[in-house]
Amino acid sequence: MPFADGAHACREAFCAGLLPDPEMWVDEWAEAHAYIPSEGNAEAGKYKVDRTPFAREVMRVLSPGHPCNRVVVMGASQLLKTQTAMNWMMASVDSAAANLLALMPSGDLAARLSARINNTIKATPRVRDLFSAPRSREGKNTDTTKTFRGGTLYIATAGSAANLAEIPARYGYGDEIDDWEDDLQGQGDPVEIFENRGSTYGRNRKWYYSSSPKKPAGVSKINDLYLRGDQRKYHVACPHCGHRHELIWVNMRTDEALTWAKMMCPDCGALIDEHHKDAMLAGGQWVATATSRDGTISFTISQLYAPLGWTSWLELARLHDSAEEALRHGDHTKMQSFYNARLALCYDSSRGVTTAEELRARAEPYPSRVVPADALVLTASVDTQPDRLEVQIEAWGPQMEHWVLDHIVLPGSPTMPPEQPGSVWRRLDEIIATPLVHASGVLIRISAYGIDSGGANTQDVYNYGAQRRHLSCVILKGASRPNRPIIASKPSQQDVEWGGRVSVGTAELWFVGTDVAKDWLYNRMELTAGPGAMHFHNKLSDEWFDQLTVERKVRKMRGGVVVEVWHKDDHARNEATDLSVYNLAIAFKLRLHTWSALDWQRLRNKLVPAHLTPDLFASGAAQPLPTVPGADPAADEEEASEAAAPVQPAPARPVPVRVHAPAPLPYQPPRRMTARRIYSRGIQ
């Protein structure tokens, strides 16, 4: 029985390693061997480059024989990015095997990529036997590591410096890099750290980045990498005159009713029907529009190039129309999604903030501390300073339209306990306990109020708020990391020191995404009515308007990368901005942004009975005190808050009146209130 010749096997392996990589082009390999798995794909089966001809050149420059070391695709969603990566990775494993590192922005996306790779391996006979079987003795095939003949494919997240260390790789794939951290745990730009993994491979290394832009220009990683390259755009020929041009949104034409959509040729002006698209794409060519200094080859492509049967021009036109409608109401989210995911363009929603003079000029003559007819829910926010508290009360109506009702400054040190006579906290209790008059004459209580725990009086705020949690007092703090939700989904537990004793975890601290909240407010600042509009009465001080508009969004360098931050001058005051942000956070905690027209109508029916006439002079203080929304976080960790539900406001408008606020009620120690509650899962 012959024995294996180990020396012969070593010689063969050594000689094979000395041979250059085969002359293999990824696009040719894909045409011959690539398959699209049936799981999660509308067009499964044998891969056909002709279906997306614009992908051919991207795969060509990803080939091992091409001298380019970095390839960038700033592309629309669901067009070519990930499938191109699949073809490139499988072709490399087959013909030029070496370690490959794939990075995703999150663990969930990394798991999805791993599953897609597994499905691709199973569907592709050419590489099926090259990978180790799952849980086999010959190697490893897990969610994060897949060994194959000649190397290993690592799948990791880009949020940990450890994932980018100690793994040498010839090939690197970075997906959705606009979602990567700007500064990787204080060690710098993750893109640079990522590329250091291939330094030992010299000119043979290859890095592929793909993403839709998700941040403004100057901050977007994928846009920065695209601009470092030669910025290739796919030009197609007009079927009428033959002029070659890029398909861009400005040339889209539709009828008023959105029953058709056509592309206008920028040269002859003819309208191009979409049925010409297949022929146009087949004859298209990539055109470099810049010169790269470091050899980066970069591409950009939008969903205007989607093959027939995918997203149509008419669908895009209707999506854009819907985004424009939302934009008229101050909501940038749909337009940003359209630009980013559909057109593969950066979008900057931070328009110039309205000036204080403009806001003063449109201040309205509605009475302070009188709830307008369209509003039904009251919130308050409190800013703590070493020598005072500042309180802002706002009223909320359907679709997050809101009115500033009062701004109050309470002099006094927050270090004095609430039980002490004259304490600033006692005066705050009196304000919160005093109901406000609605335009109909009924009284409405404040549903919930938030207190800023930042600054020099954090423990005092914890002590006060922990005792009043059952009264819908919410302790707030601005999140240190950017792009956090307007208010967190759950609080963190904080210790309270009281009378020399420590109560562990008795205070609930809710983090506020202040930058996101400011975007929300400032993007709607120009609106004078309707969804999201903010109203101001003309008795507010000039200083208040100055404080509301003192901040601007600027770009700064942090950790070697450019980030967008809200900035004010060092000595400028911004209490009005902070109070408005925290009122918005409380409104989101009450989930007012999710209320429907029916919810608001149900609340109106409970608070303003039909038989009541909107006469504020008819013994308004004697009207029955309705039960109004009030939070009860102690009873439900989710977001227990009491209030009724949202609805379309009644057509009645506020009646012009001259009314003074009711006198403050005598101080009473806090006690548990009976209140209805709103849960995140619906109205109870």
Image: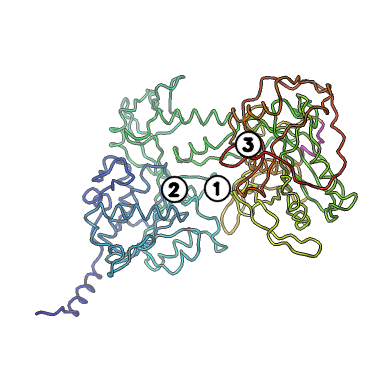
The vertical placement of 165 against 329, above or below, is below
Mark 1 element type: loop
Q: Tell us which disc is closer to us: 2 or 3.
A: 3
Q: Between 547 and 109, which is closer to the camera in this rendering?
A: 109
Q: Which residue is drawn at 69% across and 35% down?
A: 354
Q: How many marks?
A: 3
Q: Between 256 and 285, which is closer to the camera in this rendering?
A: 256
Whether residue 204 appears in this view of the structure is no
Whether residue 674 appears in this view of the structure is yes
Mark 2 element type: strand
Q: Tell us which disc is closer to us: 2 or 1.
A: 2
Image spot of residue 269 (x, y percent): 40, 23
Q: Which residue is drawn at 78% across and 29% down?
A: 624
Q: Which residue is drawn at 87% across and 34% down?
A: 663
Q: Mark 3 points at which residue?
A: 592
The amino acid type found where label 3 is placed reads Leu
The vertical placement of 395 against 511, above or below, is above
Mark 2–mark 1 distance (CA, rounded to whole Å): 15 Å
Is 335 colored magenta in this rendering?
A: no
The vertical placement of 255 against 66, above or below, is above
Please tell me the numbered disc located at residue 218: 1
Locate the N terminus and report the quarter of the image it occupies.
bottom left
Mark 2–mark 3 distance (CA, rounded to whole Å): 34 Å
Task: Point out the residue furthest to the left here.
Answer: 1
Q: Mark 2 points at which residue?
A: 211
Q: Are marks 2 and 1 in contact (CB under 8 Å)?
A: no
In this picture, which residue range is highlighted in magenta? 539-546
* Mark 1 surroundings within 10 Å by alpha-carbon count, few (fewer than 14), some (14 through 19), many (20 or more): some
Q: Tell us which disc is closer to us: 1 or 3.
A: 3
The amino acid type found where label 1 is placed reads Gly
Give the mark nearest the N terminus, 2 or 3: 2
Q: Main secondary structure of the magenta part?
A: helix
